[in-house]
């Protein structure tokens, strides 16, 4: 009995790892300044995820399992640890940000290897500069305090939420705070979790789905036709996000204890990403 139990665990290990990856991605999604897509890229699941989303009518059984376990993990991460993450950010902001910085750094080498697949050219430099600058500007943009007065504008909230979810390196929290729409976004999620469904929820989902399919198709096309350049852009997104996170962490006051804990957590994050990706690659074979 024990032998069969071990076999079941072994052959389903890749799904358990997917569940765990989704769990961490979900947590990253609720941290201000952190991009869930960047963590997905670090964990090596991003390219397949956008490929699946770009062709919703051609989803296979393995794709359904992939999305199911990744999505379930993300939902668990958001649902179970949202309050815990908020507490960590309030009490141990510096150390928490360094942990997630480590998770990103751990996946940089895999992305960089894709960039190096083709020889160096000036197009890569240009793509890197544009993508790096774009993310850095968007996340640091000052708030405009735009108020929503029409239910239909929730369509655009869904559209933008998808963009910040699918495009690596862009923090949805930062963008919505900059636009003055963050409270409206929280209102959408509150209504969904309390099953208070109205027209704004339908409009939000319509905008989200349309945007997800469109952007996923574009990103999938770029990965297929211009893979090295696409990964150059993603690498720039990751580096820009990483710089912003470290800047914000060091702009806050912190104690020596927090610095020591943060450094330890940073290396745990780096090694954790490498270990998780290594296990996932092993069980995919």
Image (cartoon, grey):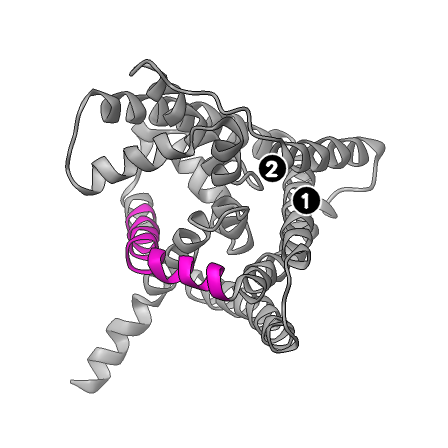
Q: Quadrant of the N terminus?
A: bottom left
Q: Nearer the viewer, residue 230 or 117?
A: 230
* Residue nearest the observer in this picture, 162 or 186: 186
Crowding at label 2, few (<14), some or many (≥20) Cα neighbours within 10 Å?
many
**Residue 135 percent across, percent down from the top left:** 64, 36
Is residue 199 shown left or right of residue 13? Answer: left
Report whether 216 appears left or right of 230. left
Q: 64 or 128, which is in the foreground?
A: 128
Residue 165 got which mark?
none
In this rendering, the answer to whether 77 lies above or below 141 is below
Helix, strand or loop under label 1:
helix
Q: Residue 12: where, in percent of width, then height?
A: 30, 66
Write the residue at 64% across / 37% down.
140
Q: Which residue is rendered at x = 28% and y = 52% of the image?
A: 72
Q: Position of residue 235 (x, y in %)?
A: 67, 45
Looking at the rendered structure, the number of numbered marks drawn on it comes to 2
Q: Tell me if residue 96 is in the magenta stretch.
A: no
In the picture shown, does residue 100 fall above or below 158? below
- The answer for how far apart the CA atoms under marks 1 and 2 are is 10 Å
Question: In which quarter of the view is residue 234 placed?
Answer: top right
Q: Secondary structure at mark 2?
A: helix
Q: Which is more foreground, mark 1 or mark 2? A: 2
Q: Position of residue 167 (x, y in %)?
A: 53, 35
Main SS, magenta residues? helix
Q: Quickly name the residue at label 1.
A: 240
Residue holding disc 2: 139
Please tell me how crowded label 1 is: few (under 14), some (14-19), or many (20+) other residues with Cα within 10 Å: many
Magenta range is: 67-91
Going from the N terminus, do you reach mark 1 or mark 2 first? 2
Q: Are marks 1 and 2 in contact (CB under 8 Å)?
A: yes
Q: Is residue 281 left or right of residue 189?
A: right
Task: Indicate the quadrant containing the C terminus: top left, top right, bottom left or bottom right.
Answer: bottom left
């Amino acid at each position: 009995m024990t032998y069969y139990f071990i076999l079941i665990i072994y052959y389903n290990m890749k799904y358990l790892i997917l569940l765990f990856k989704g769990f961490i991605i979900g947590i990253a999604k609720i941290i201000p300044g952190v991009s869930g897509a960047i963590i997905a890229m670090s964990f090596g699941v991003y390219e397949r995820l956008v490929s699946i989303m770009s062709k919703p009518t051609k989803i296979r059984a393995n794709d359904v399992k992939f999305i199911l376990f990744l999505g379930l993990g993300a939902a668990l991460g958001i649902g179970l640890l949202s309050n815990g993450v908020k507490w960590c950010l309030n009490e141990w902001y510096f150390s928490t940000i360094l942990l997630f910085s480590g998770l990103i750094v751990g996946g940089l080498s895999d992305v960089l290897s894709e960039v190096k697949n083709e020889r160096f050219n000036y197009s890569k430099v240009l793509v890197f500069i544009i993508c790096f600058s774009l993310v850095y500007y968007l996340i640091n943009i000052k708030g405009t305090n735009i108020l929503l007065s029409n239910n239909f504008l929730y369509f655009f909230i869904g559209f933008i939420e998808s963009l910040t979810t699918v495009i690596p390196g862009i923090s949805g929290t930062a963008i919505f705070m900059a636009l003055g729409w963050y409270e409206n976004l929280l209102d959408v999620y509150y209504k969904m979790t309390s099953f208070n469904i109205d027209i704004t929820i339908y409009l939000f989902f319509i905008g989200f789905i349309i945007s997800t399919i469109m952007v996923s198709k574009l990103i999938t096309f770029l990965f297929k036709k211009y893979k090295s350049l696409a990964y150059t852009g993603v690498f720039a997104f990751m580096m820009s996000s990483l710089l912003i996170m470290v800047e914000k962490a060091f702009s806050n006051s912190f104690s020596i204890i927090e610095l020591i804990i943060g450094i330890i957590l940073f290396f745990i994050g780096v090694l954790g990403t490498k270990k998780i990706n290594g296990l996932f690659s092993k069980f995919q074979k």
